[in-house]
């Protein structure tokens, strides 16, 4: 292999692929990145067997080649050399030389034959979505998925393509986030798939930097997000996502419009006192125009914080896990949110002013 | 107690004292901060039995009082309330109320009688030093002390007051840093004390923010740094600091003046490859005007990086632990450093161009 490019481009590409390759794995080859010249560019591939990231780097191929290298060392080394021309040279499949003006290094690699086979699913394009919009939508949903996978479907994010819209849903059974996205390319079809939340978070991060659209291909057990310079393949979680729609309250007795930043501040203050009581904080909505957050623990002390809000309906009270409330408040972007409650034992609903496409539900705690 | 002040001032003060109070201790009272009204201000004290930090906060004392509170909760809570007037009220010695416009909290405390007795050493002022200058000087020395204390004196920083100057020295026996500071207040005396490096790092951090001078008082087994708003008391390490002056090489065969930032870059690049060989990197100084850094490991690969330098003398070669070299290069501030070597087995010396008051020695590795 002989490939020439700018340090900046190689560095940027390695930052994309390195995130899923660097963890210690029982299969050492998974710590490597595969480098392959292809179509006049350098193709870099990493995988953790759950996801595959394929990144193309522009440059000049002077001699074709293929090799795998320890991804972390290669990434750190490339980021440590000056931003200038960089030359990758390999005469065999066991080492790669990296040359710049004043730096030269040789990194020992492994033959690409050891690397897992990357699935091909570039048939039957399913739809095309604006990358930035999908990324923004995912950021409002993905954190609500379950962290452990005692119920595998809950550790994933539901992508429900339904004719004109894509519904993104995540829930860990204590809270649920749903975001609807209009599809510009109507699909005349309906399809539900579940993508592991950890990979979805990577997809969200990667798509945030992509200006164009991404093409989506759906295979038997995998999904591909394809754009000009990067492909992400994720395995799908098998199973049925819970029928969540029936838990969405269809009415409420109290509704408050609250400044999001002020709400975060008073919940944070209370959460300091809630640490030793399972993060339980109590929220009172008063039609006099106030939201009052209270935490009370026998060991630490107590706290009451309040802020003004536009409250309609009757007096309302509900107890939440402060962490869940902070999660949704921190992941939204608008200046204000609304909180709807309908009794201590009914789920609370958080919406964004003027954005009917978003919904967040938090189950109450027995205070 | 009833004390009124601005959130900003209380918050700043708590950030100073909280650093030594927050670690879990076998003595739970050490996780607390002692609050006491005194001379029209609020005095806040924390200690880990090695050091004491006393911070005064300006405000209005409406009723005298004394109490201790969990420092971490109090600090986090005060930092979470808006920057506005804040009122501290305590009717007894078991809890303190913290009131602001829209927030109120009560934190459970403990009687001040449980708190360790704070030593009084404000007799016989020893000298006065500009706080910022002392802080800057300490930052160039303190990281060179030993981390473990198998030889207690090496886990401290030597303060050698010698008539017109203060010598600050730290060594872990593999490297040594020495900084000389001119004393404006000549002391007509000579005194050697050793302060634990961990506390010295805190002293360095705190003094960096002090505009005025600090008064230094030295007691039997403690030292006090006293300024308008903050006092730091540190215990002294008993023992004799090694007679380091005899290991300072009095000549060299090669000397290189190197751009500090470029030197850091090439050492960092090499250090990536040196991880699996005890961080060993080789440095070659060539009178042709080059510094070449090399690392070579059988497992990972190898690296050679170079930069231009002004080299005088013969060809020079030495091997160092890359971490030690990066420590000193990162903690200095000037644009360039000089490296003097006198053979593979002799210590290397790092100096700062135009600053004869600083010296750093690194022992060579057998390459």
Image (spheres, coloured by chain):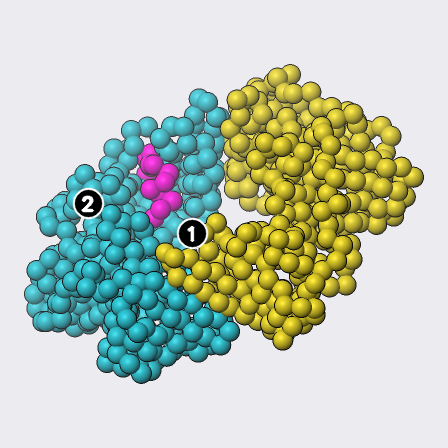
Chain colours: A cyan, B yellow
SS at circle 1? helix
- The residue located at (23%, 51%) in the rendering is A27
Residue B152 in the magenta stretch? The answer is: no
Q: Residues within 10 Å of mark 1 (few under 14, many from 20)?
A: some
Residue A255 position, x and y percent, is 32, 45
Instruction: Please state, as top left, top right, bottom left or bottom right, where the N terminus of chain A lies in the image.
Output: bottom left
In the picture, residue A223 is in which quadrant?
A: bottom left
Residue B174 position, x and y percent, is 61, 45
In the picture, residue A322 is in which quadrant?
A: top left
Q: CA distance from mark 1 to mark 2?
A: 41 Å
Instruction: Please state, as top left, top right, bottom left or bottom right, where the C terminus of chain A lies in the image.
Output: top left
Whether A349 is drawn above or below B257: the answer is above
- Residue lying at the far top in this picture: please name it: B113
- Residue lying at the far right in this picture: please name it: B188
Whether A32 is drawn above or below A362: the answer is below
- Is residue A364 in sight in this rendering? yes
Residue with the mark numbered 1: B276
Residue A324 in the magenta stretch? The answer is: yes
Instruction: Write the start and end of the magenta stretch as one range.
Output: A312-328
Instruction: Say which of B241 and B155 sits in front.
Output: B241
Residue with the mark numbered 2: A154
- The residue located at (24%, 47%) in the rendering is A26
SS at circle 2? helix
In the picture, measured across the screen, residue B90 lies left or right of residue A98, that is right
């Amino acid at each position: 292999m002989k490939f020439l490019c700018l340090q900046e481009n190689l560095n940027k590409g390695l930052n994309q692929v390195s995130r899923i390759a660097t963890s210690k794995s029982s299969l050492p080859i998974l710590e490597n990145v595969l480098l392959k010249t292809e179509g006049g560019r350098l193709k870099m591939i990493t995988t953790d067997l759950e996801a595959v990231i394929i990144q193309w780097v522009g440059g000049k191929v002077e001699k074709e080649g293929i090799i795998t290298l320890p991804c972390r060392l290669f990434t750190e080394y490339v980021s440590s050399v000056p931003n200038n021309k960089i030359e990758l040279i390999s005469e065999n499949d066991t080492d790669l030389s990296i040359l710049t003006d004043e730096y030269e290094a040789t990194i020992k690699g492994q033959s690409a034959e050891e690397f897992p086979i990357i699935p091909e699913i570039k048939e039957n394009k399913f739809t095309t979505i604006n990358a930035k919009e999908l990324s923004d939508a995912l950021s409002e949903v993905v954190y609500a998925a379950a962290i452990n996978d005692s119920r595998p479907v809950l550790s994933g994010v539901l992508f429900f393509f339904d004719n004109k819209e894509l519904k993104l849903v995540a829930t860990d059974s204590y809270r649920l986030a749903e975001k609807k996205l209009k599809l510009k390319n109507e699909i005349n079809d309906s399809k539900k798939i579940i993508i592991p939340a950890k990979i979805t978070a990577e997809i969200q991060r990667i798509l945030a930097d992509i200006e164009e659209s991404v093409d989506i291909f759906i295979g038997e057990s995998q999904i591909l997000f394809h754009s000009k310079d990067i492909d992400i393949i994720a395995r799908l979680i098998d199973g049925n996502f819970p029928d969540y729609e029936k838990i969405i309250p269809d009415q409420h007795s109290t509704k408050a419009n609250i400044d999001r930043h002020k709400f975060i501040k008073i919940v944070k203050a209370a959460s300091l006192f809630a640490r030793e009581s399972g993060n339980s904080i109590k929220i009172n909505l008063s039609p006099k125009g106030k939201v009052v957050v209270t935490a009370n623990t026998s060991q630490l002390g107590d706290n009451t914080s309040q802020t003004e809000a536009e409250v309609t309906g009757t007096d309302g009270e509900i107890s939440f896990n402060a962490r869940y409330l902070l999660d949704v408040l921190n992941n939204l972007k608008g200046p204000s949110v609304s909180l709807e409650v309908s009794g201590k034992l009914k789920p609370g609903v958080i919406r964004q002013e003027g954005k009917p496409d978003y919904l967040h539900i938090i189950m109450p705690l027995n205070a």
